[in-house]
Amino acid sequence: MISNPTAPSAVKILVAGGFGVGKTTLVGAVSEVTPLRTEEYLTTASVGVDDLAGVSAKETTTVALDFGRITVSDELVVYLFGTPGQERFWFMWNDLVHGALGGVVIADTRRLETSFASIDFFESREIPFVVAINCFHGQNTRTADEIRAALDLDPHVPLLIGDVRQRSFGKESLLALVDHLMSLPAPA
């Protein structure tokens, strides 16, 4: 007798944020498989187009998406889609968001303004999200309340502070999103 295994259910989560905030790093830190990355070297052609303020040492950039996977159980798989951060590639976000249950917005306290577009993207589409503050080199000069006020976050939006290079912080951010999704009223 041939068994007929069923495919696991899939959940899609978007990882978004400004240029150079750590989206590729978070996907890589939590994915159980080597992530698919569409990284290209920054060239002189991007001078005047991409804003390298605060990330002048950055040498590569995501031009389409990052993709990772987490198998929760035989019945459930989480697919992570990291968005490109530069404004010239934002058109990709509209395609990547289809079917996403929610998002993780990664922010850098040295450049909080780079997170506004990501937050607006999720809010305007009424897609639940959490904000994960990436403390580069362990530095964070603002309190959670100061960050929440600067980002004008609704009180119900979870805010986490940590290092996206650490798998544990990436998992914590994703679990916070799951908890947030489960706390919301069921759609009509």
Image (cartoon, rainbow, N blue to C red):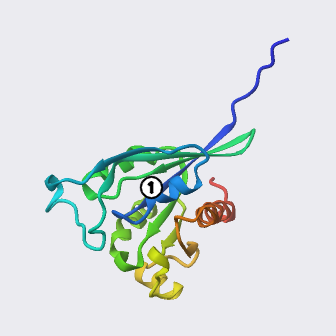
Instruction: Give residue 152's quadrant in the image.
Output: bottom left
Location of the N terminus by quadrant is top right
Neighbour tally class for label 1: few under 14, some 14-19, many 20 plus, Cα within 10 Å: many
Camera-nearest residue between 81 and 100: 81
Camera-nearest residue between 120 and 30: 30
Q: Secondary structure at mark 1?
A: helix
Determine the residue positioned at 46% across, 82% down: 139
Residue 27 percent across, percent down from the top left: 51, 54
Find disc 1 in the rendering and name its residue: 24
Q: Total label count? A: 1
Residue 172 percent across, percent down from the top left: 64, 66
Determine the residue positioned at 58% across, 43% down: 33
| Residue most extreme to the right | 1
Residue 17 percent across, percent down from the top left: 40, 63
Say what amino acid the circle numbered 1 marks.
Answer: Thr
Residue 101 percent across, percent down from the top left: 57, 52
In the image, taking residue 58 as reference, residue 188 lies left or right, namely right
